[in-house]
Image (cartoon, rainbow, N blue to C red):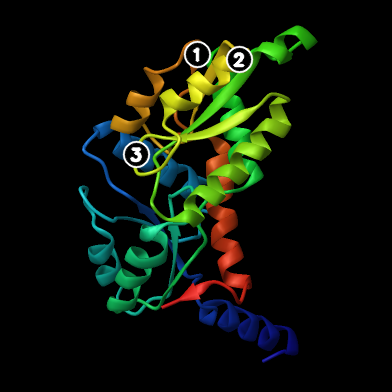
């Protein structure tokens, strides 16, 4: 056997023995609205298209199949990274998802939630433009326009902290005030935020839908706009970029919570 043949065999063997990357498990909340599941599956397809060699799976916390517990059981002992399709810290990120990971046979670590992050601001900005937000605001328009960042809401103070951070990033992008407001469990409400901005002489108020997918809260918030309302973040390319970023980040940081 020649030296070149021996080298080729060793190289081929090394390639065969190279371990597969940990699976990416996209963790969605779950919803009774069928549009939510369609959105999540579209994101899943985009992730698979971007990373064809990466095992990608879906798991729901509740309401939809497959449930996260079933997905983790099916993975067996294979390593996985759970990427929450959630926009801030809260009970699901801190308790539910790590608890399900710890109880499963899969060796799983939990990535950070998607927000806050500048990529979410990219998606929010795009959705606002699609809804009719001006591409360029002159000085007069900047004095009368504002945005309410409509989020689901949580009793966890860290969730509100994360949402406020996103609001500040979006305000810096748009050049107008952005007030976070919530559909439930936190204040201010959407209506309160709209009235506060109106009282400050800003009648042109847009609702920026800070939801991953259509659903009851997103629809409810949109009806309270005095001007225009954007669609949820959905299967925006920035969302796919962020999902993969959180996955890679979890593999390289020591701060990721492991189960």
Which numbered mark, 2 or 3, is in the foreground of this view? 3
Q: Residue at x 70, y 85 (%)?
A: 7
Q: Which SS class for mark 2?
A: loop
Classify residue 69 by image quadrant.
bottom left
Classify residue 188 by image quadrant.
top left
Classify residue 14 by image quadrant.
bottom right
As drawn, 83 above or below 116: below
Query: Is residue 219 toward the left or the right of residue 241 in the image?
Result: left
The disc, 3 or 1, on the residue closer to the chain's N-terminal end is 3
C-alpha distance separating marks 2 and 1: 8 Å
The answer to whether any part of residue 72 appears in the image is: yes
Q: Position of residue 168 (x, y in %)?
A: 66, 39
The residue sitting at the right extreme is: 139
Check if mark 2's residue and mark 1's residue have beta carbons within 8 Å: yes
- Mark 1 lies on residue: 228
Q: Which SS class for mark 3?
A: loop
Q: Residues within 10 Å of mark 1 (few under 14, many from 20)?
A: some
- Residue 198 is labelled as none
C-alpha distance separating marks 2 and 3: 26 Å
- Mark 2 lies on residue: 133
The answer to whether any part of residue 115 appears in the image is: no
Q: Which SS class for mark 1?
A: strand
The disc, 2 or 1, on the residue closer to the chain's N-terminal end is 2
- Mark 3 lies on residue: 184
Q: Residues within 10 Å of mark 2 (few under 14, many from 20)?
A: some
Q: Position of residue 105 (x, y in %)?
A: 29, 79
């Amino acid at each position: 056997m020649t030296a070149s043949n021996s080298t080729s065999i060793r190289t081929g063997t090394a390639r065969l023995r190279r371990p597969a990357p940990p699976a990416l498990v996209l963790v969605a909340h779950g919803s009774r609205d069928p549009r939510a599941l369609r959105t999540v599956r579209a994101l899943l397809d985009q992730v698979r298209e971007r990373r064809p060699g990466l095992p990608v799976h879906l798991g729901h916390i509740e309401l939809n199949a497959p449930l996260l517990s079933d997905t983790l059981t099916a993975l067996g002992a294979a390593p996985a990274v759970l990427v929450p399709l959630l926009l801030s810290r809260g009970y699901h990120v801190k308790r539910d998802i790590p608890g399900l990971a710890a109880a499963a046979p899969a060796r799983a670590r939990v990535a950070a939630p998607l927000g806050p992050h500048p990529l979410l601001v990219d998606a929010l900005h795009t959705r606002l433009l699609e809804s009719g937000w001006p591409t360029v605001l002159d000085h007069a328009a900047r004095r009368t326009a504002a945005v309410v960042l409509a989020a689901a809401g949580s009793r966890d103070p860290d969730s509100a902290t994360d949402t406020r951070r996103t609001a500040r990033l979006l305000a810096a992008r748009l050049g107008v005030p952005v007030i976070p407001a919530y559909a439930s469990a936190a204040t201010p409400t959407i209506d309160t935020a709209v009235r506060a901005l109106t009282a400050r002489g800003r009648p042109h108020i847009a609702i920026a839908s800070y939801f991953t997918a259509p659903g009851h809260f997103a629809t409810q918030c949109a009806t309270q706009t005095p001007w225009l309302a954007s669609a949820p973040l959905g299967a925006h390319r920035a969302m796919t970029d962020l999902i993969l970023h959180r996955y890679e980040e979890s593999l390289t940081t020591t701060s990721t919570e492991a189960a």
